[in-house]
Image (cartoon, grey):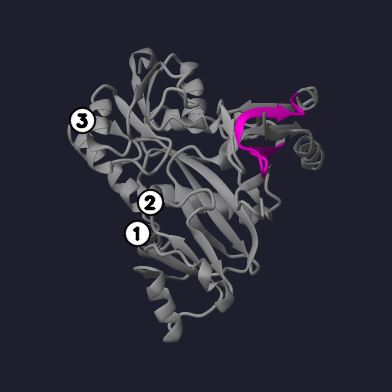
Amino acid sequence: MNTTRTKVGILGGGQLGKMFALAAHNWDVETWALDASRSFPTGPVCSHFVEGNFNNYDDVYAFGKQVDVLTIEIEHVNTEALLRLEAEGVKVHPAPAQLNLIKDKGLQKEFYLKNGLPTSDFQLFENGEAIKLALQAGQLSYPFVQKSRTAGYDGKGVAVIKSAADLPLLLPDASVVEDLVDIQVEIAVVVARNERGEVKAFPAVEMEFNPVANLVEFLVCPADLDPAIEQAAEKLAMDTIAAFGICGLLAVELFLTKDNRLLINEVAPRPHNSGHHTIDSCYTSQFEQHLRGILDLPLGSTKMKTASVMVNLLGEPGHSGPVRYEGFEEAVAMEGVKIHLYGKADTKPYRKMGHVTVLAETLEAAKAKARKVQGLIKVVSE
């Protein structure tokens, strides 16, 4: 393959598109991006930016006709246009039929059942009122987690209902209702597949969440897992991407229960927050691996170079407007501290503005340094 003659289109112009375009430019791949404004993070770094709406059929179709391979950095795109493009010979990864499954958390859960992939018990409901009726009829009991079937992300579209006192938190949407799992830890495995069927998994990572925003705050690699459980998690992720049959990346989020069962929480068929550390800490970054997968190139080594902890840089509460990064100079002076800013001009509370990967010879040293970094860097407004 002559990568210099390959046009890769990205639906979405956020930070994932930016980091993907930067990786693709190492091989002189021509990157195109579609989103509302070229001021978005991908705009300054891609070869061609097209202003448009990735939810609009005509915009997506016209954009896709200009590229050789089309991929995504966000699931919620117009898949009708993708299906037509695929039928007309444009390579689309992930495949739009599978993307339609993954976009709907209800269909996603049914897929796991059908394919013998472990997940928590669940029920599907048309709306919040139907959930209340099921509670009254004794068909549902507390505690449970409600998830909107579509459009949820970064902790949005999720309600944890522990008792009747929490019922005002119920979402009005069509929903998946799951058992509230007794979790030991949440982990993620980013796995990749190419068209020839080669599959490779990155080492499992452990996720620590911000209790207010429900966003990943610390990501630790390697995860503190029994080796047998880590191997089982990686195998489960590889089985999952094979079942979907998609090319490129699949981030598989897993619950490890208190009785050591692995359950699939949900998946994302694209580069993912849980794989950002790979840019600095692995032989192949998740973004290069996604490119390899969608271009049907041999997959790269997923071995770690060193232990790492990733810290998400989130907008501070009470700050909205033009962004300023306090503590940047002090943090960047530290050995093994790799700062990645996403190029967003304005901050707002808990908005993802960047991440920091902290490298060290041991995980304990990386964690200690990461806590210092988290205390130093504050994302505030001017």
Q: Using the rendered image of the protein, determine whether residue 118 is visible from the camera's viewpoint.
A: no
Q: Which residues make up the magenta segment? A: 308-328
Question: Residue 354: where, in percent of width, then height?
Answer: 61, 32
Task: Identify the mark nearer the N-term, 2 or 3.
Answer: 3
Q: Quadrant of residue 78?
A: top left
Magenta stretch, overall SS: strand
Tell which residue pokes out farthest to the bottom in this image.
Answer: 137
Position of residue 108 relative to residue 123, above or below, is above
Q: Which disc number belongs to residue 102?
A: 2
Task: Identify the mark nearer the N-term, 1 or 3.
Answer: 3
Question: Residue 1: where, in percent of width, then height?
Answer: 35, 18
Task: Identify the mark nearer the N-term, 2 or 1.
Answer: 2
Separation of marks 2 and 1 at Cα, in angstroms = 7 Å
Question: Residue 359: where, in percent of width, then height?
Answer: 73, 32
Separation of marks 1 and 3 at Cα, in angstroms = 27 Å
Q: Nearer the viewer, residue 198 or 5?
A: 5
- Relative to 382, is 139 on the left or the right? left
* Callouts 2 and 1 close, C-beta under 8 Å: yes
Separation of marks 2 and 3 at Cα, in angstroms = 23 Å
The kind of residue on which mark 1 rests is Leu
The kind of residue on which mark 2 rests is Ile
Q: Quadrant of the C terminus?
A: top right
Q: Which residue is mark 1?
A: 107
Please tell me whether residue 292 belongs to the stretch shown in magenta. Answer: no
Question: Residue 73: where, in percent of width, then height?
Answer: 43, 36
Mark 1 is surrounded, within 10 Å at the Cα level, by few (under 14), some (14 to 19) or many (20 or more) other residues, namely some
